[in-house]
Image: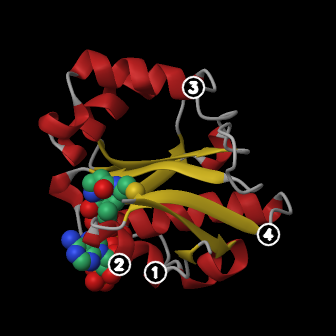
Amino acid sequence: MNVYYLADVCSVVDRSPAVPAGVIIRPIREADIPLLAQTFRRAYGPAAAGTLSDVVAEMTAAFGGAWGALWPRASPAAWRGGQLAGAVQAVRRPSWEGAPDCPWLIDVFTDPSHRRAGIARSLIGAACRVMSAAGEPRVGLTVDEANVAAVTLYKSLGFAESV
Ligand SMILES: CC(C)(COP(=O)(O)OP(=O)(O)OC[C@H]1O[C@@H](n2cnc3c(N)ncnc32)[C@H](O)[C@@H]1OP(=O)(O)O)[C@@H](O)C(=O)NCCC(=O)NCCS
């Protein structure tokens, strides 16, 4: 079941580590869509993600504001050894009815070959530093409560289920 998680932006920043050695973080841009889509598909697996063209269409829709106005500066990608290792996509406000009124991480994913190296944690930290600088006190995301890796990651950063 999907649930909303919320966190205090400052507490996420405080709990996120320095960027791992050898990793470069920069905002995503539209030209990254093909690589983002390939990495997303490897991260979720083809059965869950769908075809590459499905994922490219979804990424293109995200850049077009399908889930809220994309916040590129708060949507960092991590590069290691010239490879896209992972990314976070954030919107200024989620566009669907009933969502909390705060910036939203619409996706977080790390390529399987770069897992457990602190990539997702530092990407979320980087996104939250931009949100904090913009005066945003809270950040949210949607997670499947059966997704142990994601739930453990988010709780370790101070996220808790929205009640
Ligand atoms: C969830 C995901 C983004 C984590 O990416 P990652 O870069 O490997 O995460 P990090 O290395 O930053 O992990 C930080 C912490 O999260 C927790 N964590 C990460 N993966 C975990 C796993 N498989 N099992 C348990 N805890 C895990 C741990 O507390 C970890 O700290 P530690 O390595 O010091 O123990 C990655 O597994 C992924 O892309 N999954 C598929 C896509 C997905 O489900 N995205 C989330 C959608 S809501």
Dot 3 crowding, Cα within 10 Å, few <14, some 14–19, many 20+: many
The secondary structure type at the circle numbered 4 is loop
Near-viewer residue (53 or 15): 53
Residue 47 pos. (x, y %): 13, 36
Q: Which residue is mark 3?
A: 63
Cα–Cα gap, marks 2 and 1: 5 Å
Q: Position of residue 32 (x, y in %)?
A: 43, 27
Q: Are marks 2 and 1 in contact (CB under 8 Å)?
A: yes
Disc 2 residue lies near ligand 1 with CB under 8 A:
yes
Decide: few, some or many residues near mark 2? Use Cα within 10 Å; few <14, some 14-19, many ≥20: few
Q: Disc number at residue 137?
A: 4
Q: Earlier in the sequence, mark 4 or mark 2?
A: 4
Residue 118: mark: none
Which type of secondary structure does the marked residue at label 3 adopt?
A: helix
Q: Nearer the viewer, residue 155 or 99?
A: 99
**What separation in Å lies between label 3 and label 1 (alpha carbons)?**
28 Å
C-alpha separation, residue under disc 4 versus residue under disc 3: 24 Å
Q: Is residue 78 visible?
A: no
**Up/down of 83 relative to 17, above or below:** above
Image quarter hosting the N terminus:
bottom left
Residue sitting at x 63%, y 76%:
13
- Which amino acid type corresponds to the residue marked 4 in the rendered image? Pro
Q: Earlier in the sequence, mark 4 or mark 3?
A: 3
Q: Quadrant of ligand 1?
A: bottom left
Labels 2 and 3 touching (C-beta < 8 A): no
Q: Disc 2 to disc 3, how far (Cα)? A: 28 Å
Kindly identify which residue carries mark 1. 155
Which disc number belongs to residue 152? Answer: 2
Marks 3 and 1: which is nearer the front?
Answer: 1
Mark 1 Cα-neighbour bin, 10 Å: few <14, some 14–19, many ≥20: some
Image quadrant in which you'd find residue 14: bottom right
Disc 1 within 8 angstroms of ligand 1 (CB): no
